[in-house]
Image (cartoon, rainbow, N blue to C red):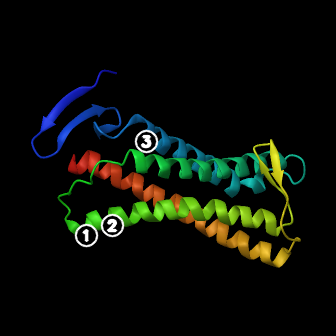
Amino acid sequence: MPHIQQTWPQQGTRYWTCAGAIPRDYRAVALSFHWLTVALVIIAWALGSFDDVLPRGSARAPGLFVHISACIAIATMLVVRLAWRVGDPPPPAETTPLGAWADRAGRLAHIALYALLIAVPVSGIVLQFARGNALPLFGLYEITSPWMADRAFARSVKEVHEILANALVILAAFHAGAALFHHWVIKD
């Protein structure tokens, strides 16, 4: 799809794509990190939320393996993504017609998203270890649990992990809603 270049005096040059207006200096790599993270979060959340649908035993094991692998990929992507942001920072946030409170809310939401992208995989790793299970690294290697299985602790960690995962998906849905609102309503 060809890009249409348009210049606004106060906002700089932007390219219009099917995803909306993207500032020219926001690189394709950063956008790739964003959408790959979105896909991995959806896969991990769906497999974690609906694992009861699969029968216990050998049928459930591949789903758990993919869930864990997606979560490890999310954590790895986050580290790479944050390193990339240092070398290629995002464009400065533009003020919105909604005022300073909306700008601060947007920054807080992004910080919360990054915090949850860290907390969910970390709590999942702790859960795997609390069950006394090894942590599979994409089927290439396993990290053995550093402690013995503790069912009560594992149940508590599982609850925390599920709450954090659901909070991540809910916040991501609000983030998507805000992006659509900005694109379709405010048109900024």
| Separation (CA) of disc 3 from disc 1 | 26 Å
- Residue 42 vertical position relative to residue 29 in the rendered view, above or below: below
The residue wearing badge 3 is 30
Instruction: Give the residue furthest to the bottom.
Output: 152
| Separation (CA) of disc 3 from disc 2 | 22 Å
- Residue 35 vertical position relative to residue 98 in the rendered view, above or below: above
Sequence-wise first label, 3 or 1:
3
- Give the residue at x 50% y 48%: 81
**Which residue occupies the foreground of this view, 140 or 130?**
140
- Viewer-side label of 3, 2: 3
The residue wearing badge 2 is 105
Element marked by disc 2:
helix
**Which residue occupies the foreground of this view, 41 or 82?**
82
Q: Position of residue 50 (x, y in %)?
A: 70, 54
- Give the residue at x 38% y 44%: 88
Q: Amino acid at mark 3?
A: Ala
Look at the numbered discs 2 and 1 and tell me whether their residues touch, using CB distance below 8 Å. Answer: yes
Locate residue 107: give its quadrant. bottom left
Q: Residues within 10 Å of mark 2 (few under 14, many from 20)?
A: few
- Give the residue at x 46% y 56%: 173
Q: Position of residue 62 (x, y in %)?
A: 81, 45
The residue wearing badge 1 is 101
Element marked by disc 1:
helix
**Which residue occupies the foreground of this view, 181 or 80?**
80
Q: Amino acid at mark 1?
A: Trp
Query: Left of 7 or right of it: where is 57?
Result: right
Query: Left of 115 or right of it: where is 95?
Result: left
| Separation (CA) of disc 2 from disc 1 | 6 Å
Q: Position of residue 36 (x, y in %)?
A: 53, 41
- Give the residue at x 23% y 26%: 4
Residue 19: which numbered mark, if any? none
